[in-house]
Image: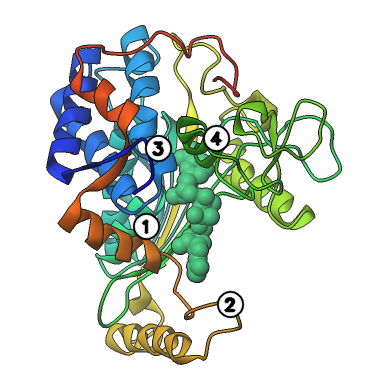
């Protein structure tokens, strides 16, 4: 195991995080849901969306940037459409409640196009689409995040890392789950590299002069995936999860670390589909299964050990982590065990806070 990393039991980690959020002011139910989500992310090896966020969340909760008693309501706007008003509650809690409404609608009508307006940072999107696939639905999810990406050909940050995820059920094994930021890497991966003081590849981000950098502390702008194509996808996310929900878009989206006393007003969007409205469910799941098996059977290219499915390596890591412990930066583990609620260090720091 790498230096500065400790293996922590999943339940212990979840309880420590929950207690930290409760100490910051969050209700137990909201704290527990958030801690469960972050533990899942860390167990999957997506450390960008796990414990690395706790001190920041705790500071925002303590300073009023999260509604501690949100009145979450569902406004049905059509047969298969609706808006969840999140009232700026804790993102993971709001977005899971929003998903509950969307799942119910998709099962009822075959389709749910549901926007969640005024939420906080929602974390790892695969958590949500996986839940939908477990209900035998095909799911798409996307959300806004703070503007820290240089658009293709541009010199200033404009869009967020605006992730997109999809899932589909299959006849055996785990649901098929794909989940990506529309940037080469999620900002949280840079945060994770910062917390472990590890260099990043020079393809992820640029420094304050717009030059590629390997120093995670020097990052001042992230790069879209595949140039203009990623740029187009992050635009799509902002149109659907921002403009269509009447929320700020692009550079007007609130910044994670700008003012922790202010609510985030972010948007998330779900499109859930019931495959039974298109085909026989059992046959559909078998076809998805067949596709994944054919991919597994393909001889790997030079330098690869096999063709993996999206999300597959995360699930392998998760099984290992649930059995042997989750990798956590020791510094963060020490903080989680301490009486310190937060470090009062993020407020007013801007998107690229140390
Ligand atoms: P990533 O680059 O780690 O993975 C992207 C996708 O590629 C995943 O589905 C992964 O399973 C797949 N993949 C990776 N290596 C593979 C391989 N060798 N073979 C087959 N598939 C492979 O993900 P990224 O872009 O760094 O995003 C990390 C997380 O950050 C996601 O969960 C995303 O939802 C979250 N995020 C959340 C934001 C928010 O504001 N809520 C903002 C941005 C990202």
Q: Is residue 329 left or right of residue 15?
A: right
Q: Is residue 55 above or below residue 102?
A: above
Q: Is residue 315 above or below residue 157?
A: below
Dot 1 beta carbon under 8 Å from ligand 1: no
Residue under numbered circle 1: 129
Counting from the top left corner in percent of width and height, residue 309 is at 44, 73
Q: Residues within 10 Å of mark 4 (few under 14, many from 20)?
A: many
Circles 4 and 1, Cβ within 8 Å, touching? The answer is: no
SS type, badge 2: loop
Q: Between residue 276 and residue 229, name the one nearer to us.
A: 229
Measured in 3D between alpha carbons, the distance from the residue under mark 1 to the one under mark 2, in whole angstroms, is: 31 Å
Q: Which mark is residue 122?
A: 3
Corner quadrant of residue 244: top right
Circles 4 and 3, Cβ within 8 Å, touching? The answer is: no
Measured in 3D between alpha carbons, the distance from the residue under mark 2 to the one under mark 3, in whole angstroms, is: 35 Å
Corner quadrant of residue 25: top left
Counting from the top left corner in percent of width and height, residue 55 is at 35, 21
Q: Residue at x 32, y 45 (%)?
A: 42
Dot 3 beta carbon under 8 Å from ligand 1: yes
Dot 4 beta carbon under 8 Å from ligand 1: yes
Q: Which mark is residue 303?
A: 2
Mark 2 or mark 1, which is nearer the start of the sequence? 1
Counting from the top left corner in percent of width and height, residue 117 is at 45, 33
SS type, badge 1: helix
Quadrant location of the C terminus in the rendered image: top right
Q: Is residue 93 left or right of residue 76?
A: left
Measured in 3D between alpha carbons, the distance from the residue under mark 1 to the one under mark 3, in whole angstroms, is: 13 Å
Mark 3 or mark 2, which is nearer the start of the sequence? 3
Q: Residue at x 71, y 49 (%)?
A: 203
């Amino acid at each position: 195991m790498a230096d500065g990393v400790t293996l922590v039991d999943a339940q212990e980690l979840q309880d420590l995080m929950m207690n930290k959020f409760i100490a910051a002011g969050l209700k137990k139910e909201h704290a527990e849901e958030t801690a469960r989500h972050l533990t899942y992310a860390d167990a999957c090896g997506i450390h960008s969306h796990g414990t690395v966020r706790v001190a920041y969340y705790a500071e925002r909760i303590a300073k009023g940037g999260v509604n501690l008693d949100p009145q979450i309501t569902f406004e049905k706007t059509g047969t298969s459409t609706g808006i969840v008003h999140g009232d700026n509650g804790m993102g993971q809690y709001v977005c899971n409640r929003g998903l509950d409404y969307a799942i119910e609608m998709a099962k009822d009508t075959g389709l749910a196009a549901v926007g969640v307006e005024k939420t906080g940072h929602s974390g790892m999107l695969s958590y949500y689409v996986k839940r939908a696939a477990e209900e035998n639905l095909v799911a798409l999810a996307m959300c806004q995040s703070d503007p820290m990406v240089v658009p293709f050909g541009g010199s200033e940050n404009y869009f967020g890392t605006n992730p997109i995820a999809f899932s589909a059920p299959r006849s055996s094994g785990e649901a098929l789950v794909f989940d990506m930021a529309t940037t080469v890497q999620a900002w949280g991966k840079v945060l994770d590299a910062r917390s472990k003081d590890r260099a990043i590849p020079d393809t992820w981000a640029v420094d304050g002069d717009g030059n590629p950098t390997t120093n995670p502390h020097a990052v001042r702008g992230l790069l879209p995936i595949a140039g203009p194509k990623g740029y187009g996808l992050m635009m799509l996310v902002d149109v659907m999860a921002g403009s269509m929900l009447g929320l700020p878009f692009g550079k007007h989206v609130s910044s994670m670390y700008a003012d922790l006393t202010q609510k985030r007003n972010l948007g998330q969007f779900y499109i859930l589909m019931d495959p039974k409205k298109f085909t026989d469910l059992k046959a559909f799941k078998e076809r998805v299964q067949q596709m994944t098996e054919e991919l597994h059977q393909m001889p790997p290219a030079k330098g690869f050990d096999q063709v993996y499915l999206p999300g597959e390596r995360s699930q392998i890591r998760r099984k290992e982590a649930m059995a042997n412990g989750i990798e956590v930066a020791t510094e963060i583990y020490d903080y989680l065990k301490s009486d310190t609620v937060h470090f009062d260090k993020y407020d007013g720091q801007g998107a690229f806070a140390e």
